[in-house]
Amino acid sequence: MIISLKDYKNKVRGCWLGKNIGGTLGMPFEGYRGCIDLDWYTQDLSKGAAPNDDLDLQLVWLVAAEKYGRNLDAKILAEYWISYIFPSWSEYGVGKANLTKGILPPLSGWYNNFHKDSCGAFIRSEIWACLAPGHPEIAIKYAYEDAIVDHVDEGVYAEVFCAAVQSAAFVESDAETLINIGLSYIPDDSGVAMAVKTAVECYKSGIDWKAARKKILQDFPGTFVFHGAINGVFEEDIPMGEPGYDAPGNIGIIIIGWLYGEGDFGKSICIATGCGEDADCTAATLGAILGIVLGADKVPEKWIEPIGDEINTMCIDATGWDMWYPNTVTDLTRRICNLMPVFMGEHCEALDDNGPIIKVKETKDLFDRETNLERFGHYTSFKDGMLKEQPFGIRVNSMPFDIVFRCVDGLNITNDKEIKFEIDITNNSAKPQWLELNWILPEEWEVSTGRSFSVNMGTVRPAGAMNPGGLPKIPATMIPHNISQAEYCVILEVSSLGRPNKQYVHIPLFNKPKITSSIEIT
């Protein structure tokens, strides 16, 4: 299936117009709880569109993508965070603080981060969809790398869901089909997936959007309320959730606006905004989805005219080098369209008289068929009402082999107390490999594998599988002694016999003091 360059450009422009419109409409209601009926902007628009981190961050990502292309990953995006992005609130702040400590993704989004399930990742999904139109499997790869800089769990699932939906929207326009495509890329029992399904059920049951909103916030309570109630009175039957648990409820609100808006652009973003919570983000994300579905030529002109083509920013530090970001939707569209063939690779053929030939998937092939939850590294399951966590993984990918180092006991250490790890290595070569693994750690510390050991990695494949095999998980324990520093960086060096490059897994570990009460009870 082919999408023309003209149609592609129209949908990319529609995406960013919708993003700018929705973010501007929702901004006055960000952080408020309650319902309000809207049909138009409520603020002074004499200076154009409202500046919004939802869009700002993606302008920075565009600059990174133009420089690094398909090699872009979480570590590169982390460097751009530190270099060019001002905000240090919530998950942004936690992620940046962890990065300055040398805690790399995905640990930067996980360690000591109670905002890990919040909304700061799904708001920056559009760029990956626009760079991979009609190929959600490509879009979600980069969405994942983006999200793990400052999120894990629900925060990551939310961005992956949105990126898959938006990429598929270049091919498919039916809302329910697109929602199901997005769901196929995230765990069925995640909070995001369950909130989406609840919103769909509410719509099909016939209840109105305000009742659907209440149902979502009761079942998936969040905490994105820092300005109070819209009408000054809090709803007693809507609880406050766990700190930072905001992505599921707000994704549910996006679905409410989408379904209850029934294809009407203005009505849809007004309903999403009218639900409060993270209103600028929900309306902006929904505006982008609808902008892709409709294309720029079908986004109502009345919504475009008050804010125009300009992008106003608030979060970008452009004082450094190599930071020429677009400041109009027109320029943003042009630069993304120019870059798209790099990310599409073999799915974008050589130019003809009408531009590149963009090959997209048929609708039936847009769904995720792999059901491979390992992509998330740290999978939290809510099945049967029980919270079940698997060890978090530090990933190092290379041509000859991939390494996942799982921190079974986390990153905190105590003097003379054993901590457990798992090492999982996959062979990316068609040939067996001998690997040598060396620990670089303080002399006094003990490690169960020995400080240096070798393993033979074959190419055993499961029946019918095409991918090379690897090693069984290698369990390891470590006992730190004579802890005298606040933090340590343990390094696992892995090399393959006869190959020139070594891979390094950096494991940051932190001294966890024993805290005792200073209060004397008599």
Image (tube, grey):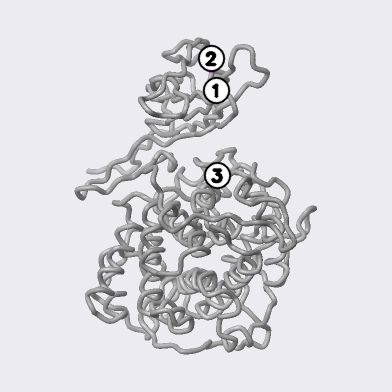
Q: Which residues are magenta?
A: 431-438
- Please, what is the dominant secondary structure of the magenta stretch? strand
Determine whether label 2 and label 1 are within 8 Å by CB. Answer: yes
Answer with the quarter of the image where residue 305 lies.
bottom right
Find residue 98 and name its label: 3
Spot occupied by residue 314 in the image (x, y as percentages of width and height) = 65, 68
| Mark in the foreground, 3 or 2 | 2
Spot occupied by residue 217 in the image (x, y as percentages of width and height) = 30, 69
Element carrying mark 2: strand
Q: Is residue 414 above or below residue 236?
A: above
Closer to the camera in the image, 119 or 346: 346
Element carrying mark 3: helix
Q: Is residue 478 visible?
A: no
Q: Going by the image, does 481 lie left or right of 520?
A: right
- Which residue is found at the position 72% from the left and 58% from the top? 338
- Which residue is found at the position 73% from the left and 66% from the top? 326
Q: Is residue 521 above or below residue 53?
A: above
Which residue, given by chain and number where applicable, does mark 1 sit on?
429
| Mark in the foreground, 1 or 3 | 1
